[in-house]
Amino acid sequence: VLPFVFIYVLIPESPRWLVQQGRIIEARKVIERIFLINRRPLNDRLELFYARLPNDVIAAREAEQKSPTYFNVLKRLCQSKLMKKRCLLLIFVWTVALSVYLGLSSALPAITNEPHEFFIAGAICEMIGLSVCLALASNVERRRLLIVFFVATALASALVPFTYDNQRNVSFSFALLGKLTASSCQLLIVVYTTETYPTALRSTGVGLSVCIARLVAMIGPQLSATQYSIWFPLPYIVYSLASCLAALAACQLPHIHTPCKLPETVHEVEKQHTPRTPII
């Protein structure tokens, strides 16, 4: 992890924060770089940037003086019924994704007598899963893709105990497939969550979802231990049912187009809200 700390110097500052601090020239350079990388026309946007600059500076400094606390932002999140529902659904989906991933990772050594073989195969499956997810996320609607990954995780987890006694290698393959799709769910839910919350609540909403999910996900490895003490198929059945419930919960989440314009406020989220489109 330590070498990746140096990537910090490559991450640009937020243009909003630079404008708020009065560092206009630096903010302009960041915006120019963004438009250059995304191959967008810049001339008209620069005129718009300078036309709105006085109002943006005033608004940014007023926001700095108000300095809303975490609990105030959380209160705003709970005041909207729509955002409250989405927050609870995202927390549940996050929890299942992390619990199943950690649970399968800790349960798989029981299927094979070669821990080194399992470690290498698991790492390769995760890399494949993340690569497939990255390739599909830009071309397939993310909610639909998330549902497909959860259903695949449910099927793979359910088939592990049914093939364990007679076909150990097939059971091991299903377990690796479940880990592959579970890792894809984790990556996809991170992107999906950031696109669901408005800018005013994004950091709070994402942080709340991740925090609760990681606390509850500690149950996953403990549940995997029941395959030794209670009943071998028990954890895999639970992971399968939980993944099915997460897929149903994801059906209630909003459809997000790719690429999409991220909402700025709760009002914009409620204004953009439309009845859910069918999955198929």
Image (cartoon, helix red, strand yellow):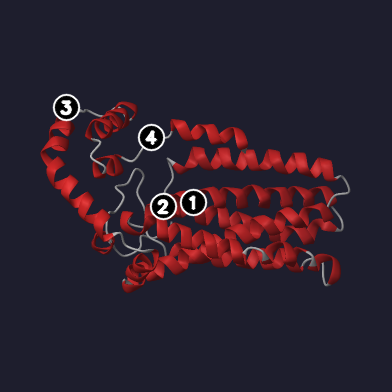
Residue 145 visible, this angle: no
Q: Residue at x 31, y 50 (%)?
A: 262
* Residue 150 in picture, x, y percent from top left: 57, 57
Residue 190: image tag: 1
Work out whether mark 3 precedes mark 1 in sequence or the reverse, and give the earlier one: 3
The Cα atoms of the two marked residues, 3 and 2, are separated by 29 Å
Q: Residue at x 26, y 42 (%)?
A: 21
Is residue 18 shown left or right of residue 228? left
Work out whether mark 3 precedes mark 2 in sequence or the reverse, and give the earlier one: 3
Quarter of the image for residue 163 reads bottom right
Q: Which residue is mark 3?
A: 43
Report helix, strand or loop for mark 2.
helix
Work out whether mark 4 precedes mark 3 in sequence or the reverse, and give the earlier one: 4
- Amino acid tagged 3: Asn
Question: Quadrant where the N terminus lies?
Answer: top right
Residue 194: image tag: 2
The Cα atoms of the two marked residues, 4 and 2, are separated by 19 Å
* Residue 164 in picture, x, y percent from top left: 83, 57
Q: Are marks 1 and 4 in contact (CB under 8 Å)?
A: no
- Amino acid tagged 2: Thr
- Amino acid tagged 1: Val
Q: Are marks 1 and 2 in contact (CB under 8 Å)?
A: yes
Quarter of the image for residue 103 reads bottom right
The Cα atoms of the two marked residues, 3 and 1, are separated by 34 Å
* Residue 148 in picture, x, y percent from top left: 53, 54
Vertical position of residue 110 compared to residue 114: above or below? below
Is residue 45 shown left or right of residue 191? left
The Cα atoms of the two marked residues, 4 and 3, are separated by 21 Å
Q: Are marks 4 and 3 in contact (CB under 8 Å)?
A: no
